[in-house]
Image (spheres, rainbow, N blue to C red):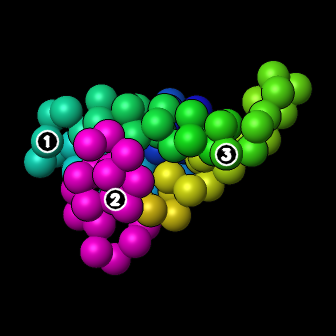
Amino acid sequence: MIMQMLDLDASKPRTFIRSVFLQMLSENEWAFDLLYCVAFMVMDKQWLERNTTYMEFNDVLKSTRVQQERELLMDDVLRIEDMPSYSLLC
């Protein structure tokens, strides 16, 4: 999900979010790892809040992706640590 969201598997950039993330990665080599952890925590939180079953896994995955994309594109988010959902790690 993260590789696709960030468009990292494409040979040519197709999304702006890729540029945003690559800038973050150039400043912090742990950016991908942090984003992975944040995404996992967001997914877990949504899963528990919705009382989801395995049949709804794709729905939770999609909503997690949308939330992460929205947060990465916020004006005041310059690092993974600036994302609102980063607080779930602490």
Q: Quadrant of residue 8?
A: top left
Q: Which residue is nearer to you in this view: 28 or 47?
A: 47
Q: Which residues are magenta?
A: 73-90
- Residue 88: percent from the left, percent from the top? 38, 46
Asked if residue 50 is positioned above or below residue 52 in the image, the reply reads below
On-image quarter of the N terminus: top right
Residue situated furthest bottom in the rendering = 75
CA distance for labels 3 and 1: 32 Å
- Residue 28: percent from the left, percent from the top? 13, 42
Asked if residue 46 is positioned above or below residue 79 in the image, the reply reads above
| Residue at mark 3 | 49
Three-letter code, disc 2: Met
Residue at (46% x, 37% y) in the render: 41
The answer to which of marks 3 and 1 sits earlier in the sequence is 1
CA distance for labels 1 and 2: 15 Å
| Residue at mark 1 | 28
| Residue at mark 2 | 83
Question: SS for tag 1?
Answer: loop
Residue situated furthest left in the rendering = 27
- Checking the image for residue 7, the label placed there is none
Residue at (26% x, 43% y) in the render: 90
Verify CB contact (< 8 Å) between mark 3 and mark 1. no
Q: Is residue 82 magenta?
A: yes
Three-letter code, disc 1: Asn
Verify CB contact (< 8 Å) between mark 1 and mark 2. no
Mark 1 burial class by Cα count in 10 Å: few <14, some 14-19, many 20+ = few
Question: SS for tag 3?
Answer: helix
The answer to which of marks 1 and 2 sits earlier in the sequence is 1
- Residue 25: percent from the left, percent from the top? 22, 43
Query: Of the residues tagged 1 and 2, which is closer to the observer?
Result: 2
Question: SS for tag 2?
Answer: loop
Q: Which residue is nearer to you in this view: 44 or 18?
A: 44
